Amino acid sequence: MSRPVSRWAVVGAIVRKDLLEYGRDRLWVLLTILVLVVVITLFWVLPAAVEGSVHLGVAGLPDPGEALEGEGLVVVPFASSDELRRVVSGEAEAWLTSAGTLVRGPGAAEPLPAGAERVSIALGVAFPEGFPEVSEGGRATVYTDAGVPQEMAGALAGLVREMGYRAAGLPLPVEAPDGLYVILGQDRGGEEPSAREGFRPLFVFMILMMELFAMASLIAKEIHERTVVAVLVTPATVGDVLAAKGISGAASGFVQAVVLLAAINSLSANPGLLLCLLALGALLVAGTAMLAGSSGRDFMSTLFWGMLFMVPLLVPALAALFPGTAATWVRVLPSYPLVRGLVEVQSLGAGWADTLPELGLLAAWAVGLFGAGWLVLRRKVRSA
């Protein structure tokens, strides 16, 4: 009399079959490796530091550094408004030297002085001749590059008007006392994330999304070719098949995400919490892959359904690239707690207690989507 087959042994056998079949699909293996290599390369190419200073060109002011000094503002003096205009428009280059600002044409042959440093000037202001002693009737000119936001140019124009009031000995219409500005939320002034930190959650999510497509394609292929029917002839049950799909999908996505974080040296900050976030994210993606794979019949239809699920999930990762609070509709998307948790742990140094709301919400979404994928795939398998 033979012993009853262990359910875990059956599930393990199906998981091994799925992983072997995934390894035989040269298209998805090549795409997975290619995306992983490209993402890792891009991460190390991106700037690791943040340039927090703005270079402002000034002409016609005797001591511009003292008059315009401020945090994050580097004043570059120019001998004339014409030189400033040429540099801002890109017709000339500006080099900082020990003797002052050197302006010369692009690619000029004459050697540069020792220690010369080239600066990029996108904003400049030319004051009228004789300013500030002779300012009545004078008109300052603000030069801006075409790529400078209108808000920044407007702020510079306001600064010029304030200097005009002070030079004329007139009181300002409105004074800004200390404490006027109240920063709501977390003040990250001086601690702005670099390009690497901003793109890190997006890169992690891209790896998980690749696994969504690969797993959805495998599920659709097995249903279309009726491989799942052959598996059900064995002692395996529908529950065993569904459990194996979920385990293989979540495990492959989790392993690839861990490989990515290890390759970009991002596992040092609270590795246990990061692994927990990645595991829940992989579970969420596995449930989504079940939904997409159950809906598709061939490669193109599976790709369509995968894109349909991917686009909403990708929005929070893209929103993480921009500072500020995410919109309400972005925060209700299933992938938002995963992206927010990665940002808080890797960029802000958050711990378990700080990310508990994100962990709870992510776990709820992961279980919900996994359960929905389980139900839809079970119906599909039974009707195959």
Image (tube, rainbow, N blue to C red):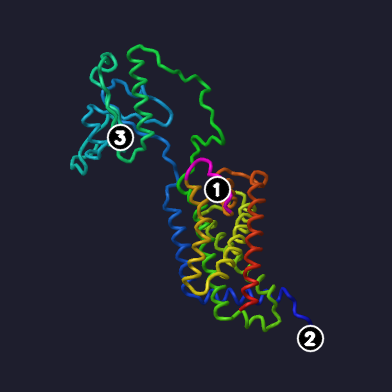
Secondary structure character of the magenta stretch overall: loop
Q: Residue at x 46, y 63 (%)?
A: 35
The x, y position of residue 73, in whole percent, is: 39, 30
Where residue 121 sits, quadrant-wise, is: top left
Magenta region: which residues? 322-333
Q: Quadrant of the N terminus?
A: bottom right
Image height of 104 relative to 61, above or below: below
Residue 329 lies in magenta, yes or no? yes
Amino acid at dot 3: Thr
Q: Amino acid at mark 2?
A: Ser
The tag earlier along the polypeptide, 3 or 1, is 3
Q: Secondary structure at mark 2?
A: loop
Horizontal relation, residue 204 to residue 276: left or right:
left
Q: Residue at x 57, y 59 (%)?
A: 258
Give the secondary structure at mark 1.
helix
Residue tagged 1:
329
Residues at discs 1 and 2 in contact (Cβ within 8 Å): no
In the image, 189 versus 371, the foreground residue is: 371
Instruction: Estimate how packed mark 3 is, as few (under 14), some (14 to 19) or many (20 or more) residues with alpha carbons within 10 Å.
Output: many
Q: Where 37 falls versus 44 (above or below)?
A: below
Amino acid found under the numbered disc labelled 1 = Trp
Number of marks present in the image shown: 3
* Alpha carbon distance from label 1 to label 2: 57 Å
What residue is pinned by disc 3? 144
Q: Which residue is mark 2?
A: 2
Is label 3 in a helix, a strand or a loop?
strand
Label 1 vs 2, first from the N-terminus: 2
